[in-house]
Image (cartoon, rainbow, N blue to C red):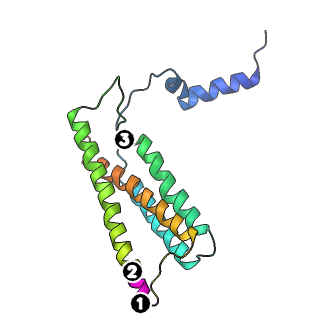
């Protein structure tokens, strides 16, 4: 009996990518510190906001914020240093403290930026020349940027709180 080449290719792909471990729940979780990727994602979000301010009639700034800051933040949250609690493996005290501290940093940073934005938008009513959101695209860009800030700063805070690996002796 001859084997189907599509099934053989699918089997090869699952072996190479490690997906068969995920499918059989044999993967062990190790914290992965992302110390610099969130900084790059935040910089891309700032560039996207600048593009939205410069060209409010185009959606390129919103797309740039979404693909450069918000989406990478979601991926980094999934595969980063914060382990998701489950019934079979609850968090210990150190992981709970690390999780709370990281989320306080992420949400606190977003809250401070929102407060600064509110005062800036209020000042834009009085001072001509200051930018303020006028369209749904502007508001959408700001919302995605705020979500990206929460995600990326949370991962950044948790990553920098992890102990550095010890140097290996030769």
Identify residue for label 2: 122
Look at 30% across and 47% down and name the residue there.
Answer: 158
Q: Which corner quadrant of the image does residue 124 belong to? A: bottom left
Identify residue for label 1: 127
Q: How far is mark 1 from mark 3, CA to CA?
A: 46 Å
Identify residue for label 3: 32
Look at 45% across and 68% down and name the residue there.
Answer: 46
Answer with left or right where residue 88 lies relative to residue 9: left
Magenta stretch, main secondary structure class: helix
Q: Quadrant of the C terminus?
A: top left
CB atoms at circles 2 and 3 under 8 Å apart?
A: no
Q: Which corner quadrant of the image does residue 168 belong to? A: top left
Q: Is residue 125 above or below residue 34?
A: below
- The one nearer the camera, 96 or 1, is 96
Q: How far is mark 2 from mark 1, CA to CA?
A: 9 Å
CB atoms at circles 2 and 1 under 8 Å apart?
A: no
Bounds of the magenta segment: 122-128
């Amino acid at each position: 009996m001859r084997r189907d080449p599509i099934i053989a290719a699918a089997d090869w792909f699952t072996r190479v990518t490690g997906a068969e471990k995920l499918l059989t729940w044999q993967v062990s979780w190790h914290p992965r510190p992302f110390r610099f990727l969130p900084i790059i994602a935040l910089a891309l979000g700032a560039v996207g906001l600048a593009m939205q301010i410069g060209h409010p009639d185009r959606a390129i700034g919103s797309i740039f914020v979404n693909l450069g800051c918000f989406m990478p933040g979601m991926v980094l949250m999934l595969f980063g240093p914060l382990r998701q609690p489950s019934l079979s493996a609850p968090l210990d005290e150190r992981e709970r403290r690390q999780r709370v501290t990281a989320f306080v940093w992420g949400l606190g940073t977003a809250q401070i930026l929102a407060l600064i934005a509110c005062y800036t938008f209020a000042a834009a009513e009085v001072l001509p020349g200051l930018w303020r959101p006028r369209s749904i695209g502007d508001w959408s860009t700001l919302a995605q940027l705020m979500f990206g800030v929460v995600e990326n700063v949370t991962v950044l805070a948790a990553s920098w709180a992890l102990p550095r690996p010890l140097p290996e002796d030769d």
